[in-house]
Image: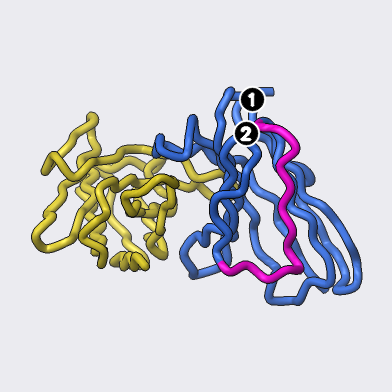
């Protein structure tokens, strides 16, 4: 696999479930990002990691919990979500946080029932 | 924080015609302006970007112009083709130690035969 991969591609979960989204980048980048993409809204930056250290947390509810065990992997742990959290969750990476070009993964389409 | 507005939200052009999408930003400290293309069901991909030290940049049929005084930038696509049909997002980044893109709401471009 090359580029940025995400699993699963689709996820349906109930409001009381706990699930995790996974992102992996094969580009040797040092920065990784989580974005939320909802219909008719701009892409919303959720979290930024640089060399496994969180450098941005954009007022995201605590029901979303990121984890970056190494510079190639990024997780988003989900628990007690709300229906309004249904969206496409995109992972991205860049060479460094100061290098602007970001490469996106294909996204996980999340539906909360 | 930064606010990016994008217009129009939908745009339909005939094959061969030109398409123009406009964005305005609020923070004069922003110095990097990328454009992403997202085809249906696919990931956003960078198609062109411009930094604040230049006023125009071209890449084949695509060009971006930047007016720092007015705080707006535009994407120009000439000789449009059906494969140009997609959602286009503009973004602006605030100078700093973290790469943080603020996106517009997107423009759905439809190129008709």
Question: Mark 2, residues whose alpha carbon is within 10 Å: few (<14), some, or many (≥20)?
Answer: many
- Quarter residue B77 falls in: top left
Could you tell me which secondary element the residue under label 1 belongs to?
loop
Q: Provide the letter of the chain coloured yellow.
A: B
Confirm or deny contact between disc 2 and disc 1 (CB under 8 A).
Answer: yes
Query: Going 41% across and 58% down the picture, which residue do you hit?
Result: B103
Query: Going 53% across and 58% down the picture, which residue do you hit?
Result: A45
Host chain of mark 1: A
Marks 2 and 1 sit apart, C-alpha to C-alpha, by: 6 Å
Return the residue nearer the eye: A62 or B82: A62
- Counting the numbered discs, the total is 2
Q: Position of residue A53 (x, y in %)?
A: 62, 43
Return the residue nearer the eye: A65 or B43: A65
Question: Mark 1, residues whose alpha carbon is within 10 Å: few (<14), some, or many (≥20)?
Answer: some
Q: Provide the letter of the chain coloured blue.
A: A
Determine whether A15 is above or below B102 in the image: below
Q: Left of B49 or right of it: where is A91? A: right
Host chain of mark 2: A
* Magenta run includes residue A14: no
Q: What residue is shown with label 2?
A: A4
Which stretch is magenta? A59-71
Could you tell me which secondary element the residue under label 2 belongs to?
strand
The colour scheme used to paint the residues is by chain
Q: What residue is shown with label 1?
A: A26
Query: Going 38% across and 62% down the picture, which residue do you hit?
Result: B104
Q: Position of residue B28 (x, y in %)?
A: 20, 60
């Amino acid at each position: 696999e090359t580029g940025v991969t995400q699993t699963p591609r689709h996820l349906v979960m109930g409001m009381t479930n706990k699930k995790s989204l996974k992102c992996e980048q094969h580009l040797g980048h040092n920065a990784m990002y989580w974005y939320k993409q909802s219909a008719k809204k701009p892409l919303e930056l959720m979290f930024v990691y640089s060399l496994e250290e969180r450098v941005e947390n954009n007022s995201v509810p605590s029901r979303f919990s990121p984890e970056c065990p190494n510079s190639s992997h990024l997780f988003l742990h989900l628990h007690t979500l709300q229906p309004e959290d249904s969206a496409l969750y995109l992972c991205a990476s860049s060479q460094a946080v100061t290098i602007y070009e970001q490469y996106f993964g294909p996204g996980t389409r999340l539906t909360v029932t | 924080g930064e606010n990016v507005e994008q217009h129009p939200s939908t745009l339909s052009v005939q094959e061969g015609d030109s398409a123009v999408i406009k964005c305005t930003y609020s923070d004069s400290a922003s110095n990097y302006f990328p454009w992403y293309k997202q085809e249906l069901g696919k990931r956003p991909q960078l198609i062109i970007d411009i930094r604040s030290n230049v006023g125009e940049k071209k890449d084949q049929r695509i060009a971006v112009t930047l007016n720092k005084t007015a705080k707006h930038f535009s994407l120009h696509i000439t000789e449009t083709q059906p494969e140009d049909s997609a959602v286009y997002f503009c973004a602006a980044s605030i100078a700093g130690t973290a790469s943080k893109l603020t996106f517009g709401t997107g423009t759905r471009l439809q190129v008709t035969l």
